Structures are given as C-alpha cells and as structure tokens.
Amino acid sequence: MFERNFSRCMGLARSDSGFWLASLFQVWRFEQFLNPEEPVDGYDARYVPVTGWTTGDIDLHDIQLGPEGPVFVATRFNCLAMLSVTASFKPIWTPPFIDRLAAEDRCHLNGLAMRDGVPAYATSVSRTNIHDGWRQHRVNGGVVLDIPTGEVASDGLSMPHSPRLHLGKLWVLQSGRGELGYVDGETGRFEATCFLPGFARGMSFHKHWAIIGISHPRGGQRTFDGLPLAERLEREGVSPSCSICVVNLNTGDIEHRIDFEGIVREIYDVVALPGIVRPSAIGFKTNEIHHTVRIDTQQSSLRLRSREPRTAVRMAATLAAG
C-alpha cells in the first residue's frame, strides 16, 4: 500500500507513461519518473503530478483518454467535456434528453466507455431534465447510452456506473444492486455475472479478470437508501465493505479481495498498471515534490542558432562605429 492525498479523488485513466486523475476542481496528469529496472527504495515506479488543469467544481466523474487528450464526465453540467486552455472546460456531448447546459446535475451522468479512443457509451442514473431529478429514479431509472446515436443501449438499471469495453463485451456495474454484468448487444438486457457486497464503482481489467472497487454506504446522506443492494445484503446476512475485488470473468467468482478498514470508506475508481509491482506517488503535502526532478533528454526539433556569429556581428559593428 502507498497513500497520497488529493481532494476528492474520482476518475482515473491510464496512459502509456502514467495516469490521469480527476479531483475536486482539477485534472492532473501523472508521469512515471523511475526506470522500472532500477528501483529506488524498493519502488519500481514513482508517479509525479507534472501538469494540472483547473476546472472548478464541476463534479468530475469518469475520465478516459482520446487522441486529443482526456475526455471526462462533468456530472454537474450533464455533459462530456474536454480540457480548455482558455476556460474551465469544453463541452463536447450532452444526452439528447438534456435541453441545455446548467449546473444542476439533472440526470447524474457519471460513466464513460471509449472505443478506439472515441467516446462510445455513457451511464446515467436517469433520463430526467430537472435539477436533481435523478434522485427519484435510483432504483430502476438508470440507462446506458450509445453516444454516437444518443439512443438507449440498456435501461431499467439501478444506478449504473463504470461502463467499460473489454473482450468484445460492454461491461457495466449496476451499483444499486451490487452487480457486475454486461449488456447483451442484441437485446439490451443487462446480464449479471456476480454479486458484489458493496456499492460498486470503478473497474479495470487484466486479461480475464475485472478489478472492481466497492464502498460502504455514504454516512449522513440518503443516496443509497431504499436500493435493492440493501435488501440483498440483508438477505445474504452480510454487511457492506470497502474493498477491491478481483473477479474471474469466466466464472463470476471473486478470486481475490482486499478490504479497507478505518477512515477509508469509499472507492470511486481503480486502474491496473501492468508490469509495475510496487508503485509510489508524489503529493503536495510534503516537500518531496520540491526535490523530485527528471531531465528530458530527448532531442528537440527546435533549431537554435549559435551565439558566436551574433557576437562576431556585434564586435564588427562596434569596430566600424569606432
């Protein structure tokens, strides 16, 4: 385990050399500074936040990478968006039932799946078009949306999250029921693969395993009250946990599980880092970031002129003036 604190960590997206993180009001790009073959203090990776964009509190959720940079869900504004160099964000898509951009979290758009670097599917808790309207449709109002067409790919879901394309299937977490499953491409029916003993959000894959985060109910709020998940947990005689579960997609078995205790009660997203055994990261609460430096040794395409000819010209001009 290695812990660093960032405000309200949400969506994660792996890149070729690091990962991206959506947080309370910023998006961060982390880069890997170590040579994995030359560990430092036993760590074979050190991820450093090298670039940050300020978006404001737009309730960032899932974030994925496309050819032009990250695409993320701006849940408060009910849209998919990209980063902007002149504004907080740039909207690129809204569900067809949303009539305008408004900071009202009307449908709780939350999840994003990419296909070949292009947004393909999104999850939403409802199809409502009024402020906080989704809260009355948590039990069975959830939908998976086909982004290119705007059509509903699957409906009748309970708080769907984390849509992902893997091994030819569209996988989805039906969080309100504690289920991992996939959407049948012919019928649009959600086919459950296994039950997860907690509120499931965040999913990554490695070969035929899914790595999934599950959380405790959020204390002091009614977001999870009345969901089928609570009834299922009571029927099974178990309490919800905050865990990372590794599920065999072929059998539906939870083959490994890491439980978190203490102050950690919720997980939003997870990413697998193939080839990395013991990663570390740099945060902002200590002075580590002051002294973590890596020099870019790649040759620049920018051609700089030597200073010698310019110096010679100045000397010649001085002699002529004299």
Image: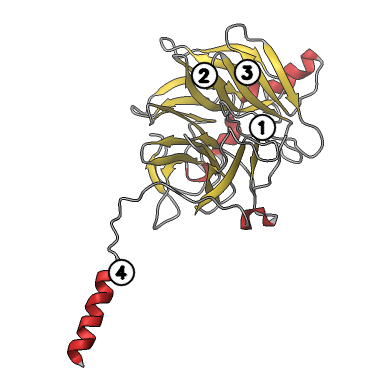
**Residue 223 picture location, percent across and down:** 67, 35
Q: Is residue 46 found left or right of 64 in the rendered image?
A: right
Q: Amino acid at mark 2?
A: Trp
Q: In front: 36, or 114? A: 36
**Residue 59 picture location, percent across and down:** 55, 45
* Residue depicted at 42% across the width and 39% down the height: 98
Separation of residues labelled 4 and 1 (CA atoms): 47 Å
Q: Amino acid at mark 4?
A: Arg
**Residue located beneath label 3 in the image:** 179
Contact between labelled residues 2 and 3, with CB atoms less than 8 Å apart = no
Q: Residue 307's mark?
A: 4
- Which of the two discs, 4 and 2, labels the residue nearer the N terminus? 2
Separation of residues labelled 4 and 2 (CA atoms): 59 Å
- Which of the two discs, 2 and 1, labels the residue nearer the N terminus? 2
**Residue 68 picture location, percent across and down:** 36, 41
Separation of residues labelled 1 and 3 (CA atoms): 30 Å
**Residue 280 picture location, percent across and down:** 65, 39
Contact between labelled residues 2 and 4, with CB atoms less than 8 Å apart = no
Q: Classify residue 227 by image quadrant.
A: top right
Q: Classify residue 178 by image quadrant.
A: top right
**Residue located beneath label 2 in the image:** 171
* Residue depicted at 44% across the width and 36% down the height: 65
Q: Amino acid at mark 1?
A: Arg
Q: Classify residue 160 by image quadrant.
A: top right
